[in-house]
């Protein structure tokens, strides 16, 4: 009989502790959600063109273009310029980390965690959405990411064109050698040689196509209303957590 009573007491203690801990966890989560600031979302929309030529010099369909683009947008190649242009090391450190500047790696992690990239179906549009407790910051960061990616694409294209010019210039020199060694075919070769020279000069004058590879369609504006408000969920968790919390306290206070 005594053993059975002891088992019953232990069961009540374990159940009381479980209810108490569960209630505390739910109440803690509810309070955290109630106290956390609401989140605002700002979206910048861009239009993209796949301008990267293949090995033959032609622009072909790339099934991984969007996936590759998203990885580049979230990389340090792009985000480092966002951190620099908005001085996020200092701003975030001053506002949230006791005035200590954040490391670049910490800034990259924050940017990636609050960034959402979405392709617009059946179009060449991409939505760059950034979430922040500050509506102005949300818009500034979204626009900065779009601008940084556009600059990256233009810089990459310039480098590709520069390498192409080097190849054509070498071809031009090789043709000059052939013309000097084959005077009988010099007239036809001179015509082609002249066309090649004109192509090289045209590429030098306009290294970037008139159709910009990344175009702003809609810049982000500071949102007026939050999209993520945690208060209703926080209140619900707090209310639900009170029941097991009180139940656990009553069981633990009950005399054996």
Image (cartoon, rainbow, N blue to C red):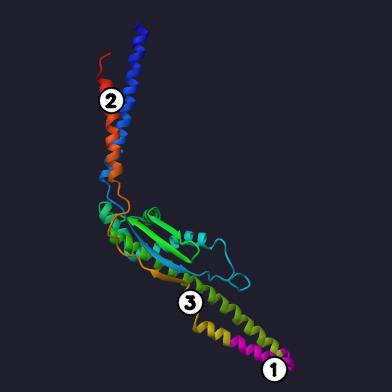
Disc 1 vs disc 3: which is toward the camera? 3
Q: How far apart in space, not on screen, are marks 1 and 3 (Cα)?
A: 36 Å
Residue at image location 28% in from the left, 51% down from the top: 38
The residue singled out by tag 2 in the image is: 247
SS type, badge 3: loop
Q: Majority secondary structure of the magenta segment?
A: helix
Residue at image location 33% in from the left, 31% down from the top: 22
Residue 87 in the image: above or below residue 192: above
Mark 1, Cα crowd under 10 Å, few <14 / some 14-19 / many 20+, is few
Residue 67 place in picture, x, y as percent: 51, 59
SS type, badge 2: helix
SS type, badge 1: helix
Q: Nearer the viewer, residue 108 or 102?
A: 108
The residue singled out by tag 3 in the image is: 211
Q: How far apart in space, not on screen, are marks 3 and 2 (Cα)?
A: 68 Å
**Mark drawn on residue 187:** 1
Query: Does residue 188 show up magenta in the picture?
Result: yes
Q: Is residue 143 something one can see in this rendering?
A: yes
Disc with the residue nearer the chain's start (1 vs 3): 1
Mark 3, Cα crowd under 10 Å, few <14 / some 14-19 / many 20+, is few
Tell which residue pokes out farthest to the right in this image.
184
Residue 5 place in picture, x, y as percent: 34, 10
Tell me whether the residue at label 1 lies in contact with that at label 3, contact meaning CB atoms closer than 8 angstroms. Answer: no
Q: How far apart in space, not on screen, are marks 1 and 2 (Cα)?
A: 100 Å
Residue 112 place in picture, x, y as percent: 40, 55
Q: Which residues are magenta?
A: 181-197
Residue 138 in the image: above or below residue 17: below
Residue 7 in the image: above or below residue 141: above
Q: Is residue 81 something one can see in this rendering?
A: no
């Amino acid at each position: 009989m005594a053993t059975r009573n002891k088992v019953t007491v232990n069961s009540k203690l374990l159940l009381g502790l479980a209810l108490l801990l569960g209630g505390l966890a739910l109440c803690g989560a509810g309070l955290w959600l109630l106290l956390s600031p609401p989140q605002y979302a700002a979206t910048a929309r861009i239009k993209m063109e796949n301008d990267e030529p293949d090995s033959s010099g032609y622009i072909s369909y790339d099934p991984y273009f969007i996936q590759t683009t998203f990885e580049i947008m979230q990389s340090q190649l792009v985000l480092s310029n966002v951190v620099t242009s908005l001085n996020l090391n200092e701003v975030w450190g001053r506002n949230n980390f006791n005035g200590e500047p954040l490391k670049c790696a910490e800034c990259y992690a924050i940017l990636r965690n609050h960034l959402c990239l979405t392709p617009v179906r059946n179009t060449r549009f991409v939505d760059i959405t950034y979430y922040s407790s500050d509506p102005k910051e949300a818009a500034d960061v979204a626009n900065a990411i779009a601008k940084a990616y556009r600059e990256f694409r233009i810089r990459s294209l310039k480098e590709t064109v520069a390498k192409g010019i080097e190849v054509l210039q070498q071809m031009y020199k090789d043709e000059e050698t052939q013309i000097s060694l084959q005077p009988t075919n010099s007239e036809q070769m001179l015509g082609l040689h002249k066309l090649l020279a004109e192509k090289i000069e045209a590429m030098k004058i306009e290294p970037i196509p008139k159709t910009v590879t990344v175009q702003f369609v809609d810049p982000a504006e500071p949102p007026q209303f939050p999209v993520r408000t945690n208060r209703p969920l926080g209140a619900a968790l707090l209310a639900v957590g009170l029941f097991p919390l009180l139940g656990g306290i009553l069981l633990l206070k009950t005399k054996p």
